[in-house]
Image (cartoon, helix red, strand yellow):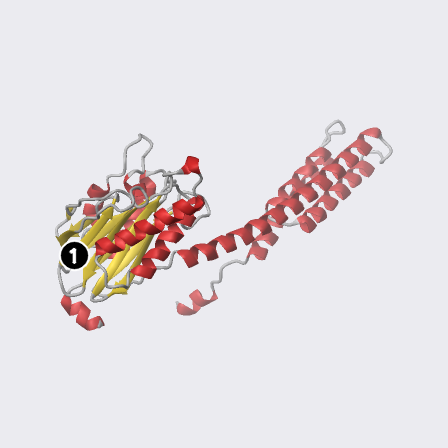
Amino acid sequence: MASRLGRARPRRPWQSARALLTLPVALIVVITVVDLHAPHDVHLGPALVIAPALTPSFAGPRTTAAVGALAVAAQVFLGVTHGGLGTTNHIVQIIALTVLVVLTVLYSALRMRRQAQLARVRTVAEAAQQVLMWPLPERIGAVRIASLYLAAEDEAQIGGDLYAAARCDGGVRVLIGDVRGKGLPAIGEAALLLGAFRESAHRRVPLTELATTLDQSITRYAAELDRPEEEGERFATALLVEIPDHDAVTRMTSCGHPPPLLLGPGHVVTAPSLHPSPPLGVQCGVEHTLDVFSFEPGDTLLLYTDGVVEARDERGRFYPLADRVARWTGDSPEALMHHLRRDLLAHAGGQLGDDAALIAVHRTTAERRRRHG
C-alpha cells in the first residue's frame, strides 16, 4: 500500500495544460471533418474561432497563437476544398478568423501579464501579513492555544482584527482586538496595536496599566495622522487576559470588546462578568477596570471579535456563537477552531461581511504541565 501511495503524484500544471490542449485541437479536427461532409450550402468554417478562443483559459500566448494558426490553416484547407480561395466568402472568412486570432493572442498576453503582477502582489501581501500577524504558539505556559482568522476581503489573510500572546512573569498574556474598518486598509492600526502590545506585555505592570499604554499608542498615532475632519475616527476595541501559571484566578481588562466565553465540562458555556471601558483611542486618560474570574484546568476560554457574532445568514439572523459552541466544549482547541470555521462560514453563506478572529485558550491540568515541562 505504501509503495502505491508513493507512486501517486499530483499532476503538474504543464501536464494539465497539455491535456486541455487536446480540446481545441479536437474541435478544429471535428469542425473540419464535419464541414467536408456537410451539404454545400452549410459552412462551419466560422466556428473554428471557438478553438483559439478557448485556449487562453489554460495556456499562454504562444500556445494560443499555435492553435490559432492551426484554425486558420483549417479554414484555408476548407476554402480550397470548397472551390478555391478566390471566392469572396472564403477570403472574408479567412481574414475575419485571422483578425480574431490576433486579438485572442493579444488578450492572452495581457492576461498572463496581469496574472504575473497579481502573483507578485500576493507574494508581497502574504509576506507583510505573516510579519505582522505572528502565528500563536500551540503551547505557552499553562495553556494550549489555537486561533482562527477569517478576513472579509478576498486574497487577504488579515485585516482589522488582531491577536497576540506573550509570556510574562509567571503567566501568559493574551490580546485580541478589532480596529475600526476592515480588510487591508485597517492593517496600519492593527500593526500599531500589535507592536505596542509585544513591546509592553513582558513588563511587570498591571493589566490596567498595559491597557493604558495601548490607549496612548492609538491616541498618539491618531493625532499624528488624522486630519481635522477625521478626528475620532481611529479607535480599536481590545480585550486583555492574564492567565497565571499556578492560579485559577484569571485577570481581564476590556476596552469596549465583547466578553469571552468560558467553556466547561458538560457543554456548559458561561460569559465571565465584564466591566468594559471605552475603546482605545476614544477617551484619553480613562481608568480601566480589572475583572477576575476562575479559569480551572480543563476549561477553555474562547476569545472572539464582533465579526463572529455579527455574521448574518440569508435571513439576516446573527450567528449564535454561545449556542453553537456548546456542542464542542469537550474538544481540543484545534478541533474547536475547525468546527467553528466550518459552521460560521456555512451560516454566512461562505462570505463574511467583516473580519473575524477567534482564539481558544485551554488550561491544561497539572499532570500535563509536569509532563511537558
Residue for point 79% across, 40% down = 76
Q: Which of these two is toward me, 121 or 165?
A: 165
Which amino acid type is marked by label 1?
Thr
Where residue 217 appears, as percent x and y from the top left, is 35, 51
- In terms of depth relative to the viewer, which is nearer, 345 or 114? 114
Depth check: 280 or 359 in front? 280
Q: Residue, x 58% and y 56% (percent of image)?
A: 15
| Residue matched to label 1 | 250
> Where is the N terminus found, in terms of image quarters?
bottom left
Q: Where is residue 233 in the image (x, y as percent from the top left)?
A: 38, 39
In this rendering, would 138 be left or right of 369? right
**Residue at disc 1, secondary structure:** strand
* Residue 255 can be seen in this image: yes
Q: Position of residue 75 (x, y in %)?
A: 76, 39
Residue furthest top as drawn: 41
**Corner quadrant of residue 229:** top left
Q: Callout 1: few (<14), some (14-19), or many (20+) C-alpha neighbours within 10 Å?
A: some
Q: Which residue is pictured at 49% across the width and 62% down the height?
A: 9
The reply to whether residue 161 is visible in this rendering is: no
Left or right of residue 326: residue 237: right
Residue at 39% x, 45% y is 222
How many numbered callouts?
1
Check the image and report above or below for 136 versus 42: below
